[in-house]
Amino acid sequence: MARRRATKRKAEQKVGKQSAEELPKGEKEASSRAKREKASAAAKSNEEPEILEDKRNMEDLWQAAFPVGTEWDQMDAVYEIKWDFTNLENAFESGGVLHGKRVYIFGCTEPQMVFIKGEGKIICIPAVVAVVSPFPPSDKIGVKSVQRENEEIIPMKEMKMAWVPYIPLEDRLSQVERFKSHQIFTLSCTQRRAALKHLKIDRIKKYDYCLPYFYNPLKEDEEEQNTVVQIMYPTEPPVVCDFDWDMDDLEEFADEKIKDEVLLESEKEEFKKFIKEKVKESKKAQREAKEARKKAVEEMDEKTKEAYTNMQFFKFYPVQKTGTPDISSVKSPFINRYYGKAHEVL
């Protein structure tokens, strides 16, 4: 009797084994996957529940503002550190400096030496500039570097940049059409990084030298008073220098370049002629700029004048917290050569 029961169990085991082997491939995979999922679920049930922090309503505002002038290969490094811009978010709350105001925001980065875990390292520190204004501060971008002889002031759209409305997180599921009066705009760039490989090097580098442009016709531009011209005399190698027509004597200036062996004696007269032409061009440009500014002010209505008078610039740096470097010693009110200094640094 016992022998018959043992024989029966072996037969059942053999049939069960054959049945599993004879299952179609898809069913076998599904069976295996189900077992893995069951084991995984059992393991998770013994783990501590994962706690996810709720995202703040304007947590990504600083990231929505394109960091103008940052080299493309440095972009990822900017976001490797979990920077905290809760000071920018709080500025829009009741009692904050931006509460209830129309604001235009752009980003920038400032390479600085800071200490991370006791080690000195140069990193691109992000900063955000908020412009309080009833209208866009500018629709242009300035392009200038020491490598570029001439400064360019071009429309933002040429660099695929534009002011776009920023919609806080809690409102993103609503219809955009409902927002009749946007109060926050960020400078956005639609240039895709994946497409950079198809662009010429000059075009790519042009982004590195971009600066948000601003011009207040009520204030005399520093360039209108500038007596210094940048010289790049076309010889081999080129003579690069600054000439101040108020302070420098042209004859002595040329002799000094010959003495420094950057200019040949035979090139002296042509060099002087070249500088005179550059000074003439600069004076003409200043004269035209003054006339244009004067005309713009004369044609400006009182509401626009009031807007330019009351326009304010606020510069935000990341808040110090655990895991981020101490940047307190490198904060600066300077924005760029067009905007000058911020009214307040936060």
Image (cartoon, rainbow, N blue to C red):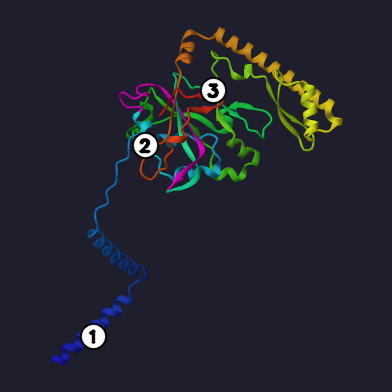
Q: Residue furthest left?
A: 1
Residue 267 percent coordinates (x, y): 84, 30
Mark 3 touches mark 1? (CB < 8 Å): no
| Residue 11: numbered disc | 1
Location of residue 313 in the rendering, given as x and y in whole percent from the top left corner: 45, 23
* Among numbered discs 1 and 2, the one appearing first in the sequence: 1
Q: Residues within 10 Å of mark 1 (few under 14, many from 20)?
A: few
Q: Which mark is residue 339?
A: none
Q: Position of residue 201 (x, y in %)?
A: 64, 42
Q: Earlier in the sequence, mark 3 or mark 1?
A: 1
Q: Quadrant of residue 174?
A: top left
Picture residue at 45% right of the left edge, 43% below the top:
79
The residue under label 3 is 214
The answer to whether 114 appears left or right of 322 in the picture is right
Q: Nearer the viewer, residue 222 or 98?
A: 222
Residue toward you, 47 or 269: 269
- On whether residue 92 falls in the magenta region, the answer is yes
The residue indicated by pointer 2 is: 59
Of marks 3 and 2, which one's residue comes earlier in the chain? 2
